[in-house]
Amino acid sequence: MVKDVAEVILNSTYLTALTGAGVSAESNIPTFRGKDGLWNKYRPEELANPQAFAKDPEKVWKWYAWRMEKVFNAKPNKAHIAFAELEKLGILKAIVTQNVDDLHERAGSKNVLHLHGSLRVVRCTGCGFEFEVEEPPEIPPLPACERCGSILRPGVVWFGEMLPPEVLDRAFMEMERSDVVIVAGTSAVVQPAASLPLVVKRNGGIIIEVNPSRTPLSEVADFSIRGKAGEVMEEILSEVRKALF
């Protein structure tokens, strides 16, 4: 099946990818769902929404500082590298990711859309000023905006918040242009991300799913490869390279 998928990729005119937490799991970043997911240990309503932050910002910040440390110390894995290589070859046009890490960028990918924000970004709750950080803040004290003095918050999308409209619009635009999409490491249950590959399908395109387990997307995927994203994407890249070189 990998050879067939490589052939489809090589014959594509506009290839995109949608990636989820499973892609970063091989870099030892905990996923949210699954048997070892973070939501089995923590309640989302206590940590990842504006009300929780308003009630106990120190508790929320301590959890996010821990997550930031995990992410900042992680290294891109074979999946991130394979996607970056496909982009360098001029085949992969864009990556839409549900992940809040920057491992795609650190692997070399240039055109990456972050649906759920980024842990590299912090935002002021007062004036809205945003900036990137190189290391997590030490909590306490609560980090404050140097412009207006208000509390800073992680630059991620919390439950109950809207996705950045300009990023979402661009993501749907990329899918409208795509004739092939690789969907890797996502449970395909979180909306609106889960509907993005269906745009490609609706337009007569091909869905390639890479996931260890069956997902709701498996019903409509043209190819469903069971396995870890890093291993599968490395195999796909190898086949693509054989055909090209």
Image (cartoon, grey):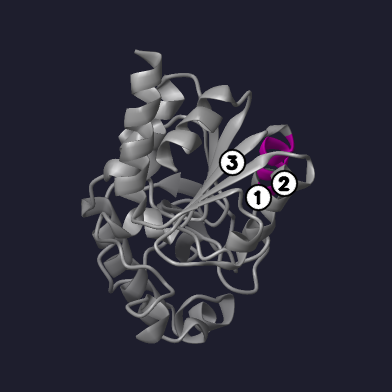
Kindly identify the amino acid type of the residue bearing the numbered disc 2.
Lys
Q: Are marks 2 and 1 in contact (CB under 8 Å)?
A: yes
Q: What crowding class fits label 3: few (fewer than 14 Cα within 10 Å), some (14-19), or many (20 or more)?
A: many
Q: What crowding class fits label 2: few (fewer than 14 Cα within 10 Å), some (14-19), or many (20 or more)?
A: many
Residue 21 position, x and y percent, is 42, 60
**Residue drawn at x 61%, y 48% as measured from the top left:** 222
> Which one is earlier in the sequence, the residue at label 3 or at label 2?
3
The Cα–Cα distance between marks 3 and 2, rounded to whole angstroms, is 9 Å
Looking at the picture, tell me which residue is in the foreground, 62 or 71.
71
In the image, farthest residue toward the top: 245
The residue at which mark 3 appears reads as 181
65 sits left or right of 219 in the view:
left
SS at badge 2: helix
The residue at which mark 1 appears reads as 197
Between circles 2 and 1, the one closer to the viewer is 2
User: Magenta residues: mostly which secondary structure?
Assistant: helix
Q: Is residue 129 magenta?
A: no
* Image-quadrant location for residue 14: top right
**Residue drawn at x 65%, y 52% as measured from the top left:** 164
SS at badge 3: strand
Residue 144 position, x and y percent, is 41, 62
Residue 144 vs 87, above or below: the answer is below
Residue 237 vs 121, above or below: the answer is above
Which numbered marker is on residue 201?
2
Looking at the picture, tell me which residue is in the foreground, 95 or 159.
95
**Residue drawn at x 67%, y 34% as measured from the top left:** 178
Kindly identify the amino acid type of the residue bearing the numbered disc 1.
Pro
Looking at the picture, tell me which residue is in the foreground, 175 or 75.
175
The Cα–Cα distance between marks 3 and 1, rounded to whole angstroms, is 7 Å
Kindly identify the amino acid type of the residue bearing the numbered disc 3.
Val
What span is colored magenta in the figure? 168-176
* Image-quadrant location for residue 108: top left
